[in-house]
Image: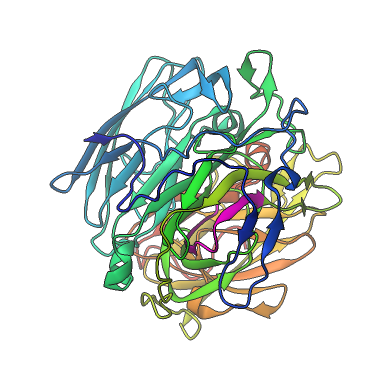
Amino acid sequence: MTRPGTRRFSSPRMVIGLLVTVLLVGCAGSNAVSGPPHNLPATAAQDGSTPEPGPRLQDPPEVVSRDGVLRTTIVVERRKVRVGNRQLYAMTYNGAYMPPTLRVRPGDRIDLTMTNRIDQDTNLHTHGLFVSPRAPADDIFISIKYRQSYHYVYRLPRRHPTGTYWYHSHADKMSAPQVAGGESGIIVVEGLRQHLPPSLRGITEHTVALKDFQVQGDSIKTQPLSIGAATNRTVNGQQNPVIHIRPGETQLWRLANIGANIYYRLHLPGIRFHVIAQDGVPVRRTYSEDTLLLPAAARFDVLVQGGAPGTTRLETLPFDSGPAGNRFPRADLATVVTDGTPMTRAAIPTDLAPYEDLSRAKVADRKTVAFTENKAGTVFYINGRTYDPGRTDFVSTLGTVEEWTVRNDSDEDHSFHLHTNHFQLMSVDGKTQDPTHSVYDTVNVPRRGAIVIRVHFQEFTGRTVFHCHILNHEDKGMMAVLDIVPPGSRSQGSPGR
């Protein structure tokens, strides 16, 4: 079942004009932002132009499960399509730069046939889903050849966390060019609204999928990719779309960094992001932030509330990933217009969803992961070795809890991602993290710093991977193989310690 357009349960009125006084007030105590819209800083696009506010934000079309099954086909092909404000050749899923969102429920089965019509091997990874790493599910060691098809079957547990996930190519040494070219889309596991009070279960919802593209001739550039090069940032494949919200209205925004390499520091002047889920997992206690850092592959589900009538910009603030890394400039992502009939501002819920706290869990094993790279930044290592799909680097036992120290011994930040199981972030550079919102599948590891995580290996066995989700780094070696084995199949301890 495919549904086009915005997933909307109440519609704010269209604004008559965008040239209005900017005055957007967030939560009580925040400062007003004022000034005419044309004085707001604007994004410099790759060609140096300044994008004007675009059309109304369009949420991606949706493929929705029915009777416990989602059946769909994804065709991978290089086609000339609309990307932002241009017509460019892109690596498309089903002929679109922004493909359908897959909507499922806990306990559902996904039957998905991928057909490859590009002249490179490709495959599919359902990023963050708690599903088997074995074929025909989330086996990233599969290679789908040109003109071949593969039928994936994923079975979601009934206790699967509810939130935002995504799907993308995980082809060996080709992930960065294929994702940068367009091979990525959103997955939503339904049920997050059930944790909200009844008054908020019918609110307007928007996907805010962040993808960027560089241009080479009439195509999206895929090789060679320079992470720090000028790029064009899009929301749902649109450049600077307009998002409408009524004064006092509460909306659910699914913020997802589904590009290949870059970071975002999201900020919406005068409005706070009330985080209700991160990396697909509802938080135990809601928290509010003025700015959210989204390393490569991260997601946040947030509640936002409209202030006074006016116009402002959803922006990404400057971010410096270190002397060996990149400086990402400030950029506008979307124009947010507050207008229409005011609504009574709802109370933001505090306690949300229970989740296992591993702080006092028995630790069966401890492992160390060290990120390093050569001086030229052309080869990247985990524990001194580059990725080899035929080698097993770590072995972990199903049903146990392990503590990993992920050390970044380089001069740039890295985005750590673990497949199959989420993890609890215990500390960053020695600072203990709040256990009420510390479950992730992707986190930033500061340069010359370290994080400590705990992982409870549950339900699924098989070979899987962990890696830096800056895909240029993954493709150049920064990935390792983890084998999750049944109890009793090995003694404690593991390769790669």
Q: Is residue 353 visible?
A: yes
- Residue 224 in the figure: left or right of residue 175: right
Q: Position of residue 147 (x, y in %)?
A: 38, 14
Nearest the camera: 382 or 323?
A: 323
Verify whether residue 463 appears in magenta: no
Spot occupied by residue 123 in the image (x, y as percentages of width and height): 44, 31
Q: For residue 31, which quarter of the picture? A: bottom right
Determine the residue located farthest toward the left in the rendered image: 67
Q: Which residue sits at x=73%, y=47%?
A: 40
Nearest the eye: 13 or 150: 13
- Residue 219 at what x, y percent from top left? 62, 17
Q: In the image, is residue 31 above or below residue 362?
A: above
* Helix, strand or loop: magenta stretch: strand
Quadrant for residue 276, please give it: bottom left
Q: Where the N terminus falls, by quadrant? A: top left
Image point (69%, 79%), residue name: 431
Q: Could you tell me residue 475's position as x and y percent?
A: 63, 36
Which of 391 and 305 lies nearest the eye of the viewer? 305
Reply above or below: 414 against 27: above
Look at the picture and state if 60 lies above or below 160: above
Residue 256 left/right relative to 342: right
Quadrant in which residue 196 is drawn: bottom left
Q: Which residue is pictured at 36% across the width and 68% down the height?
A: 488
Q: How is the image coloured?
A: rainbow
* Callout count: 0
Q: Over which residues does the magenta segment extend?
A: 298-315
Q: Is residue 311 magenta?
A: yes
